[in-house]
Amino acid sequence: MIITLASCNLTKFVPQDQYLLNDVKIKVEDTKDVAPADLMKYVQQKENTEILGFWKLQLGIYNTASLDTAKWTSKNARKIGEAPVIFSEDLVESSCTHLQRAMHNKGYFRATVDTATHAKDRKVNLQYIITANQPYTLRQYTMVLPHSELNNIAHNRRQSLVRPGMQYDADVLNQERQRVASAMRRRGYFYFNAEYLQFVADSTRSTRQIDVEMRLQDYVKQMDEEQQDKIFRQYTIARVHFHIDYDPERLPEDEEMFSSMQDGYVFTWVGQKLLRDKILMRHCPIRPNEPYNELLVERAYARLNQLAPVKYVDISFEPISADELDCHIVLSRGKLNSVSAEVEGTYSAGDWGVAAGVGYVNRNLFRGAEELSVNGRASYEWRQNGGRAIEAKASAGLKFSSAMEVDLSYNFQNRPDEYTRSIFGAGLNYDLNQTRIGLNHHFRFLDISYVYLPWISDAFRDQFLQATNILKYSYENHFIVGLGYSGNYTTFRARNPHRSYWNIYYNIETAGNLLRGLAKPLHFGVDSVSGNYMLLKTPFAQFAKGDLSVTFNQMLVPNHRLVWHADLGVAVPYGNSQTIPFEKRYFAGGSNSVRGWAARTLGPGGYKGNGMLIDFNNQSGDIRLNMNVEYRAKVWSFIELAAFVDAGNIWTIFDYEAQPNGHFKWTEFYKQIALAYGIGLRLDFSFFVFRVDFGVKLYDPARLYDGSHSEWRTVPNGLNWKDDMAFHFAIGYPF
């Protein structure tokens, strides 16, 4: 035994002559094709849950309990915490068997599993040592199948997952069974399933090669002629029945039932009709008098579930003749009307900000799955210097079942020391969701904004809106007329929620190109100072903008994950613009950025804000870079703790006089990436997540240029808890 040191507190409730299972590891020798992490699921006994890879917080909470189980504190400590895992030799032996079987299924037929234990202070560290040896490969792959359609599908070399020369893998063979069975059901063979197929392997050769044959299961061959005919018979859909708020297996109670029929479709409902017949027919790819197709069933689930008023979809089939099926689709209505509210706050260096929002959604406005959403939001920010800012937003959108959407918006901004601004917006959008592969598309065919500034203070005008100041174009009345496309891809699958997954978001938008192309033919006016074209005597913006955001949720153990995030955004003005409109610029700092800074107080580059409200406008840029890593651990029920490190900043494309050190330079930008760290608390109530984050500055690029040489914000360098921390409240995860 190798003796290791450990705290005896963790063994408080470990019985005498027994050991706490302190650590479990897997080592795979002589191959890199099998990852130890993939084998951990075959281990029958694992150590207590760890946070950050070493801290057994839940075990520590459990050990705070006293021996008196009647005490309230002891009861709750045992309930919230996690009892010690007692080392079991029987479970070790069982784990070895399961691990050897897992290696066998991967083609390592001669793999061996040994164990090594290291113990002291009533704790055991356990290691499984797997010697893989050389894997077996497929020498020959044959198919002996008595049905012509089945035989053709199995022999499709382009789609087959099994090929001679590949390493033997039981998982791949099972996937091949599923592929063949699914292809049969897509051709109308309703009753055919993967369990009817088997693989027979011959591993008697001494050359580490194996012959594999696909054939029907013996019990299928022994079925009578009628049963076999049922399996190998193609079926057609006779009628499609829609049951709305009505289960055909249960009679409705105290409610009147209605029904109608149209072109092979049958509609049955109770109470008020949820959706018009044409809407259901349009969104259901399963059609009467057409062959059964499993793929269409999957599409029907996806498309019907996308209808806003539908909560649940269940599809089943009933044989009504020798070769016909009736399709039954049960739809249950969801919550047609809902109201939501949210509150968000921030604190930094004595400055406070708070925001509140409310929203209303009607998911079936005209009984055609039209979704009306109305949202309002108001925010107030005040600072120690007496400055304040008020902002109010209102928006409304109407989304049709065709996924076309029309939206309107209004944004009012009042900064008493600076300006009053109103922004009017309208858009025409279209959503295309490919739920089966986790890809969603959002097309903005028309995106119109009109920015109107009825009042600007003299101080703000003198400082920012001089003819030589490039920022002045953002504080004049102007149009933004553009279009764009954005998409989101995820590898998350609800059927396997504990698997690591990716989220990728991207966005491309342009503005002003159409108007610029029409300027000369339609004789647009020209501004006498800037020389830019104007629409209705108002300038219009011209720019291109692109964004990319990548997030990886790395699942460690149940309820523990490491989330990696990075996003990059670039906006370039050209043609009719010398700068990006303020509404389209990037900002840094805040609850979803580098959390050691308050919202919109970081950057650009090494620019140092003067702490005045009026300087808020200079802390914007054309380039954004964020990099984050966050460890999330659910410690009890709805309570989740987090620890994070953030990095990022914004920069300007051009060197503006009003934003010194804010210009992006390849030789400088990496020195201007701000760093912050902190901890957070998440309250996950399922329907929403309330988040509190406490961030601390670690590296402040603004201090690079002030001569203080104190850009690293550590205690020896004069860390100021008032100026170098930020407190954030928010709804939802940061990424």
Image (spheres, rainbow, N blue to C red):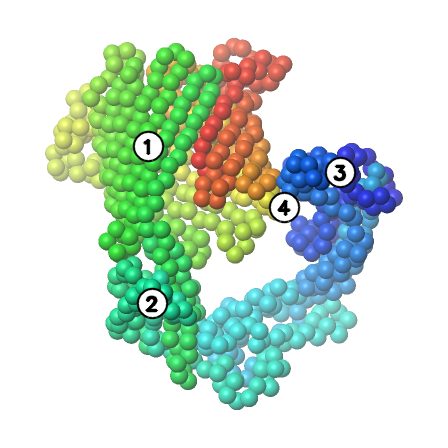
Q: Can you identify the residue that label 3 sits on? A: 67
Label 2 vs 3, first from the N-terminus: 3
Q: Can you identify the residue that label 2 sits on? A: 242
CA distance for labels 2 and 3: 60 Å
Q: Residue 476: x and y, percent?
A: 23, 23
Helix, strand or loop under label 2: strand
Q: Quadrant of residue 294?
A: bottom left
Q: Nearer the viewer, mark 1 or mark 3?
A: 3
Q: Can you identify the residue that label 1 sits on? A: 377
Q: Is residue 658 visible?
A: no
Q: Is residue 553 visible?
A: yes
Tell me if mark 1 has few (under 14), some (14-19) or many (20+) residues whose alpha carbon lies within 10 angstroms of its own.
Answer: some
Residue at position x 35%, y 14% from top? 387
Q: Nearer the viewer, mark 3 or mark 4?
A: 3
Q: Residue 703: x and y, percent?
A: 51, 15
Label 1 vs 4, first from the N-terminus: 1
Q: Nearer the viewer, mark 1 or mark 4?
A: 1
Q: Residue 138: x and y, percent?
A: 66, 69
Q: Nearer the viewer, residue 110 or 315?
A: 315
For the N terminus, the image quarter is top right
Confirm or deny contact between disc 1 and disc 4 (CB under 8 A): no
Label 1 vs 2, first from the N-terminus: 2
What's the amino acid at mark 4? Val
Q: Can you identify the residue that label 4 sits on? A: 557
Helix, strand or loop under label 4: strand
Q: Is residue 273 above or below residue 223?
A: above
What's the amino acid at mark 2? Phe
What's the amino acid at mark 3? Leu
Confirm or deny contact between disc 1 and disc 2 (CB under 8 A): no
CA distance for labels 1 and 3: 52 Å
